[in-house]
Amino acid sequence: APPRRPLRRALSNSPRPRSSAAATAVASSSAVNSILLRSLKEHYLEVSKMTPPPKISPPKPYTIVKGALDQTSGPVLRRSYGEAGEEISISVARLSNIMPPGADSDSDGSDGAGGVSGSISQLFLHVDISRPESSKSLQFLCGLYPDAVGIHSVCLRSKTAASGAVAVAAATKGGGEYQGRIFQELDEKVRDAFHFYIEARGINEKLFPFLQAWLYVKDHRNLIRWFKSVGAVISEPKPE
């Protein structure tokens, strides 16, 4: 039989495609990470240089909830109202992030704009109104515009129930205790009376300048944190 030594030598000198491919993949991944980190840094620096809006105070007697900017959700403004000692709290978000297109038909204050430029002029309010002796709170979901406020829904909820705009929005879609009729299906006089009710408590377009500026600052802070967090994850060394 012919000797097999040359064959073994040939095999030992042949390239190792798997190792080479793995090395190429690592180098490619590292290059992609570098490109992404550089892009994140550029955008982070760009966002950091953005000029914040002028400092605006909320209309009196509303006061800013301490630490609201650092919370994921929750009320931004609070006030007391009337001899009964009503407690009113207001949370805010971009309307386009909460309500589907066309859901703001109750108000004529929308210019119909879409995207970021449109949503910054359309805010979503979650208003909670309660009395100390009551186990229930009256909650409104509203669209707030530079020149108007429109009610999307009204519901009565237990104070011990989950709070927040998302919980209220879920409640209006059904389930749990009876929440009343869809707001648009109520008699026009009843709808007008509800609008007078919230306007008497200072829930109107005068809130818009402050809440718009507050939301801008909060979004800006969140974006800065996001750039930092994503960059930290991508640049983390892999465990050996």
Image (cartoon, rainbow, N blue to C red):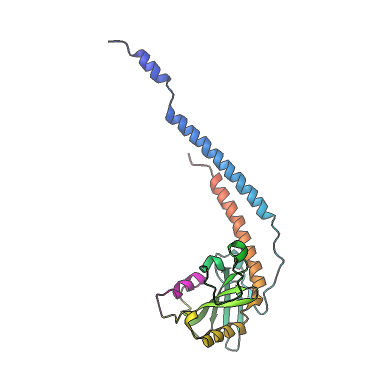
Residue visible at 53% across and 35% down? 27
Residue 129 spot, x, y in % from top left: 54, 81
Which residue range is magenta in the image? 162-177
Q: Is residue 175 magenta?
A: yes
Place residue 203 in its image quadrant.
bottom right
| Left or right of 121 in this view: 179 | left
Q: Which is more toward the observer, 83 or 231?
A: 231
Tell me the quadrant of the picture where the N terminus can be found: top left
Residue visible at 63% across and 81% down? 202
Going by the picture, which residue comes out furthest to the left?
1
Residue visible at 44% across and 80% down? 179
| Left or right of 100 in this view: 123 | right
Going by the picture, which residue comes out furthest to the bottom?
83
Residue 26 spot, x, y in % from top left: 50, 36
Residue 30 spot, x, y in % from top left: 54, 39
Q: Which is more toward the observer, 54 or 99?
A: 99
Q: Which is more toward the observer, 66 or 213?
A: 213
